[in-house]
Image (cartoon, rainbow, N blue to C red):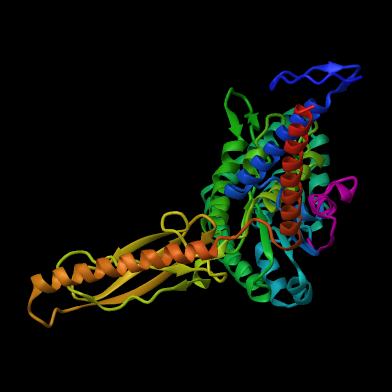
């Protein structure tokens, strides 16, 4: 026999079961909580799940890093790790030893035109050999190797160093560093960086012309010599390879990060700056000077790329938006800043200081004034609008100024009302179609359960 406790708030358990009243109260609480959750979600939707990644075809380009040089298993390379994570297909056209000039020539040859046009995702690792090739020449000279006869430079340099005596090793290092820091080499490196900057602009332009919609991700340059210092012969002075390499690496990364409108940078530089060189093959114990990423390093690169794909929203070029016309403005002697109305392709009204920033110039005197709109937030790019400031032909500056201000205020108010109306009309639920139907059905069921629960409770209260 079940005992019904009519206390409104006490919940008692008899014979291991809840009473009918307790069940009714629990249902009521659950119903209220569900309705509250739906209400909160409708008012302030929260992105619960990560953005769904849909990459049907992934194409990788680059040098030996993208090719997975020195890995025992190429499947440990970042290209394969990204492919596996996306559960998609990929094609890797990376070539060991390729520099930016050679890569640009490859793109312009249209050898991979079809693959690029079909790609949803393109990753690039290029530019290291613009500097590394020259460094290898200096290393061969310092280690007594003929560069023209070298087949695989890294293991041969390692072998030459291993066979040298302790004194010879220090002499080799000192000769190498002296050549590396000479004025001639410094000038040569700077020319290479300048050449890379121009090549990179042309590479991006060529890719976007072939496939404007593909997501392009380029990997940053990392410092393979982070924290590496070696003592000089006959003294306490040391050679700081880390700082020297960083001088040029920072310049290369600055080029990559200076204009990212058409691509995204996978920022791996700081992640590779770990003590003990844990992400690269370099080892000071056996003088393995291989600067390529090891298994851990490739995982760092892959994770960075995947995080970008999961968390970043596609930026919208503000040049693709619609801008309201700015009519001729009457000269007032003060700065004229007409309001703008900007909508994207879907009709959403952009919000100033959230979606874009505005700069006015030459907007006081009679003549042509300029409005510069810079996309921010989910919008990118720059759009320029010109309007005319014309002379007050009525000759009544005060009256016209007042009338102009009143008209301007009325126009602004009208625009504001239009924006508010449009904004309301453009509000979109974070769900549509079948998802919306499901939520409506669930909401109706919850409401019915809530109403039935109350009726049952009232019935049993009157027992």
Q: Is residue 396 left or right of residue 430?
A: left
Give the camera-side residue of 463 and 208: 463
Q: Where's residue 373, x and y in %?
A: 41, 65
Q: Is residue 58 left or right of residue 200?
A: right
Task: Indicate the quadrant containing the C terminus: top left, top right, bottom left or bottom right.
Answer: top right
The answer to which image quadrant residue 458 occupies is: top right
> Which residue: 57% across, 51% down?
253
Q: Is residue 225 left or right of residue 408?
A: right
Magenta span includes 38: no
Q: Which residues are magenta?
A: 69-94
Give the camera-side residue of 420 and 379: 420
Whether residue 362 is visible here, answered yes or no, is no
Give the camera-side residue of 269 and 81: 81
- Is 363 above or below relative to 226? below
Magenta span includes 87: yes
Q: Where's residue 82, x and y in %?
A: 79, 52
């Amino acid at each position: 026999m079940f005992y019904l406790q009519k206390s409104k708030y006490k919940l008692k358990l008899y014979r291991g079961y809840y009473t009918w009243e307790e069940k009714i109260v629990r249902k009521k609480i659950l119903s209220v909580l569900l309705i509250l959750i739906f209400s909160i979600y409708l008012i302030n939707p929260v992105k619960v799940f990560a953005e769904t990644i849909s990459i049907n075809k992934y194409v990788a380009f680059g040098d030996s890093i993208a090719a997975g040089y020195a890995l025992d298993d190429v499947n440990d390379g970042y290209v394969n790790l990204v492919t596996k994570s996306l559960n998609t297909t990929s094609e890797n056209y990376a070539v060991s030893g390729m520099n930016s000039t050679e890569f640009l020539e490859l793109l312009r040859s249209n050898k991979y035109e079809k693959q690029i046009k079909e790609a949803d995702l393109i990753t690039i690792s290029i530019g290291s050999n613009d500097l590394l090739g020259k460094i290898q020449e200096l290393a061969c000279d310092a280690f007594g190797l003929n560069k023209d006869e070298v087949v695989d430079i890294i293991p041969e340099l390692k072998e030459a160093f291993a066979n040298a005596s302790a004194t010879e090793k220090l002499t080799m290092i000192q000769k190498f560093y002296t050549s590396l820091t000479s004025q001639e080499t410094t000038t040569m490196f700077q020319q290479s960086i300048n050449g890379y900057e121009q090549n990179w602009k042309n590479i991006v332009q060529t890719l976007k012309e072939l496939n404007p919609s593909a997501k392009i991700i380029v990997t940053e340059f990392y410092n393979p010599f982070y924290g590496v210092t070696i003592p000089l012969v006959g003294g306490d002075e040391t050679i700081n390879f880390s700082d020297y390499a960083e001088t040029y690496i920072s310049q290369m990364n600055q080029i990559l990060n200076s204009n990212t409108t058409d691509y995204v940078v996978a920022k791996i530089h700081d992640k590779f700056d770990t003590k003990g060189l844990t992400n690269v093959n370099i080892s000071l114990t056996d003088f393995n000077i291989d600067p390529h990423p090891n298994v851990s390093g490739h995982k760092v690169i892959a994770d960075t790329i995947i995080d970008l794909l999961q968390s970043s929203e596609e930026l919208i070029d503000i040049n693709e938006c619609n801008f309201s016309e700015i009519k001729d403005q009457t000269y007032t002697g003060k700065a004229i800043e007409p309001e703008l109305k900007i909508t994207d392709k879907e009709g959403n009204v952009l919000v100033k200081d959230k979606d874009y920033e505005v700069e006015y110039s030459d907007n006081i005197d009679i003549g042509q004034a300029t409005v510069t709109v810079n996309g921010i937030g989910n919008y990118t790019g720059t759009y320029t609008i010109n309007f005319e400031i014309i002379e007050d032909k009525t000759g009544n500056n005060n009256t016209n100024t007042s009338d102009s201000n009143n008209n301007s205020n009325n126009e602004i108010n009208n625009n504001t009302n239009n924006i508010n109306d449009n904004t309301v009309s453009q509000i979109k639920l974070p769900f549509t179609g079948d998802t919306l139907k499901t939520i409506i059905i669930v909401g109706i069921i919850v409401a019915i359960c809530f109403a039935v629960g109350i009726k049952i409770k009232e019935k049993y209260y009157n027992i």
